[in-house]
Amino acid sequence: MAVQTSTKPNVYEDEDDEPLVFKRCSTKSKPNQLNAEAKKIPAQRQVGQPGKQVSEHCSSNGLNSSVQKGKMVPSTKSPPVKSPLASPKASTSSAGASAVSNSKASTSSRASPVPKSPPSTTLDGHSKRLAEQNKSTTIKKEINSIEHPAQGNSDSEDEKPIGARLGKVKPSEDSDDDKPLSSRIAPKSKVGISGSHPYDSKERKPVVSKVQKNGSSTTDKGKAPSVVSSKRPLDKANPSENSSAKRLKVSDSSTSVKNKAVAAKQEPKEEDDDDDFIPISQRSKKVASDSKSSLTKQTVTKVGSFSIKKTIKKSQKASKFTKYSKSTTKPPSSNDGQTKWTTLEHNGVIFPPPYKPHGIKMLYNGKPVTLTPEQEEVATMYAVMKDTDYVQKETFRKNFWADWHKLLGKNHVIQKLDACDFTPIYDWYQNEKEKKKQMSTEEKKALKEEKLKQEEKYMWARVDGNQEKVGNFRVEPPGLFRGRGEHPKSGKLKRRICPSDVTINIGKKAPIPECPIPGESWKEVRHDNTVTWLAFWNDPINPREFKYVFLAPSSNLKGLSDMQKYEKARRLKDHIGKIRASYTKDFTSKDVTKRQIAVATYLIDKLALRAGNEKDDDEADTVGCCTLKVENVKAIPPNSLEFNFLGKDSIRYENTVEVETPVYKAIIQFQSGKRGSDDLFDMLDTSRLNAHLKNVMDGLTAKVFRTYNASITLDDILNKKTKDGDLSEKLVVYQHANKEVAIICNHQRTVSKTHSAQMSKLTEKIDDLQVIVKDLKIDLDRAKKGKPPLKDADGKQKKNLTPEALERKIAQTNAKIEKMELDMRTKEDLKTVALGTSKINYLDPRITVAWCKRHEVPIEKIFNKSLLAKFSWAMPVEPDFRF
DNA sequence: TTCCTGACTTGGTGATAGTTAG
DNA sequence: CTAACTATCACCAAGTCAGGAA
């Protein structure tokens, strides 16, 4: 087991001991210890404390990390010119820049073979190539898209209690600028547990209550939010950076396609990767060897990396990763600047089936009403929503009525919604649902197959010769608009989309998809290779907006852009010290705009707030950083700020943080003389802010900070907290890190309806087990004295067991109890935290993959099937990769 | 400069497929 | 084998941000 770990452990450990620079403050709430500790760690960090600054600085430029890694290129500094080309930072390049693959050239061959059906099988080894590519971060890698065969991962393990270990984690400390500043955001109020007794046991932590959605909440809001302290030393700016910052106007790396082309050229040998045709079974061998070689190669370059070959096991493991990397065929075409593809074939989109009238009559003033199919369709949409809270909302009903009334006509019997009784339709619907549920497995299966058969042709596209999965090829069916929060348009009828609403985008030489509805035709057919959409139509609710059909996340196109996103965030690491120094300096600038930019940037960096674009009146009233209102922030002496606002999706953001005094003062100034509903940052909007950011780092925008803070936090926690231990303990560490990121990003979910019931059930079970333990102890005592055990509850005589056997049983039961308690704590802890969002969008998968490789954690334990497909580009990463 | 359009990423939820406990 | 859960996925809403028109 200890495989690779060998090298690293020490490193990390050391870190722990280092002085921390940032530390979190404790939350106010007093969680029980476990929590508290755990939470603290990540959650709140103080931004710099004075004394420690030094270290901070250093690290800031990533040095730290690089050092640790040993390798990853110290170079952070890349030449000032960021090159359009490669965005990648120099650092990566070390390995070899060489390998970029590019591609177009090779393309053709591979592609063809791929059958239309999803290729399920290929596994393969392109890893090598990929690996190299990775190293060089050059953008263009080829990502191939093929689907992976079933991977069966069988590992089953699963589930260990997650929370288990949290308690043990020690508070971390971080030091560097690199580290995320953020602090904890989530408000922590504590809530009591609902059920009867709380779970119990030892430490119970108060539950954190989260925020509620839509503001309504409330619940506990009063509680104490956590406070973060932040202080970052001012001094730090790095001189050097400035120059680079200036950047010439090169295009931003992300777009840098052009370069890529050049780079691409190289693609050496990878050709052999194609094993697409080899049966899987045979492939495995090959894979292993490939991977090995690739790894080896890497090893060479970098000193410290662990060598794979050490054990067989290892190689097997490696193969696991390679199996998920795409095997594909050709690399994506290189783009030059704008080009996203050279050839594109697909079959268009599929439309929902026409409405089938059911003929059930609803009641109006208690009397049945006959409706036309169109009217009935809309009535049914509403009827079906009877038990959702949408229909409780005034806006929803009003909008629905307006649209439906129009359909009914002025002289219809139905004149007002309140006198309508949709129950008959509702009941009919419930009944249909029930019937469906009752169908036999075979029937269900047949139905599913039927559907699959119809949709199959729409599921795949061929992009530059590669077979790629299409994301959303189904046109949205008509329905009532379900806006989130207090959306002014919620309840409006979303009309049916027809082919004449749809614009298709396809390669010039590709056959134009046949319109699936006889007699109708597409609105337009374009051949625009500067965009990635396959089709779009105007949103019926807001005609100036569009609904697009894109490729699935597992596609090369998406994978490439995903990777570029993370590379950009990694670049921020090299500039963050300078950026922080610069905005710190501007907190006291005489120029109000400058001061606002500085404070806004600080909030975005420290709290991971979203940029906050302006919104129209016909959208829900939510805000982001630039659109914060005076009333959303409350200054709490001596230097804390209490935030409370509705953010994206009308999710409430509640957090109290300690900020640096100049920030605190600046906020008070920005608020003075304004009404609560006025903009806090009146001189600012997102484009101004982003324009400023762009001056500091090429391609930098507000959202990059979210990605950066999320990923660096994961990398940091993972590397500091992972200890040797069994798999489940490692998974707990991962989950803990993931949770911290989710908290920073304020990713919430609603508490499941059955949550409290589940908790009390668990409590009950634990109580039962405790009774059992008690009885066992009595029996043990008796057994020691040679007496027979007591009768059981039914009055039956229990089996006579030896004291040893009884002791074993007691131990087992206690272990069970402990595990359950842990599960409960974890469950309670995560009841309002959504871990998935950050995994999908913010955490550089290479951090996870590398960590898995280092610690021998099967990647399938962390990434599910879709994530594995989406992140296939990250699978070849070197084990010592650090964000 | 500001406004508007267009393209693409990010996000929460409910239905469903898959698992596990009883 | 069924009930109870859980994990996953499809769905589609809601953001971000670039770039061009006004």
Image (cartoon, coloured by chain):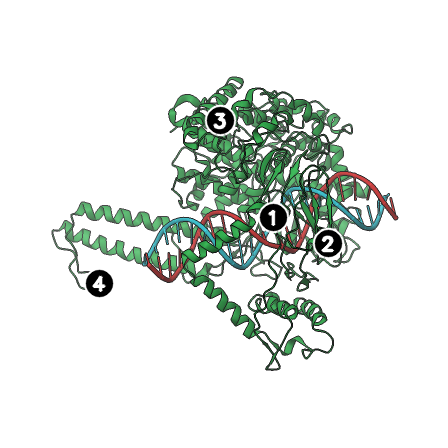
Chain colours: A green, B cyan, C red
* Residue at image location 47% in from the left, 62% down from the top: A436
Determine whether the residue tagged by mark 2 lies in a helix, strand or loop: loop
Q: Where residue A472 is drawn, which disc sits there? A: 1
* Same chain assignment for discs 2 and 3: yes
Mark 1 vs mark 2, foreground winner is: 1
**In the image, what residue type sits under mark 4?**
Ala
**How far is mark 3 from mark 4, CA to CA?**
56 Å
**How far is mark 1 from mark 2, CA to CA?**
37 Å
* Residue at image location 78% in from the left, 46% down from the top: A684
Task: Give the chain of mark 3.
Answer: A
Residue A586, image x, y percentages? 75, 38
Task: Give the chain of mark 4.
Answer: A
Residue holding disc 2: A629
CA neighbours of label 4 inside 10 A, class few (<14), some (14 to 19), many (20+): few
**In the image, what residue type sits under mark 2?**
Lys
Residue A523, image x, y percentages? 73, 51
Q: Nearer the viewer, residue A370 or A621?
A: A370
Residue holding disc 3: A11
Mark 4 vs mark 2, foreground winner is: 4
- Left or right of A297, for residue A56: right
Q: Where residue A793 is drawn, which disc sits there? A: 4
Residue farthest front in this picture: A519
Q: Earlier in the sequence, mark 4 or mark 2?
A: 2
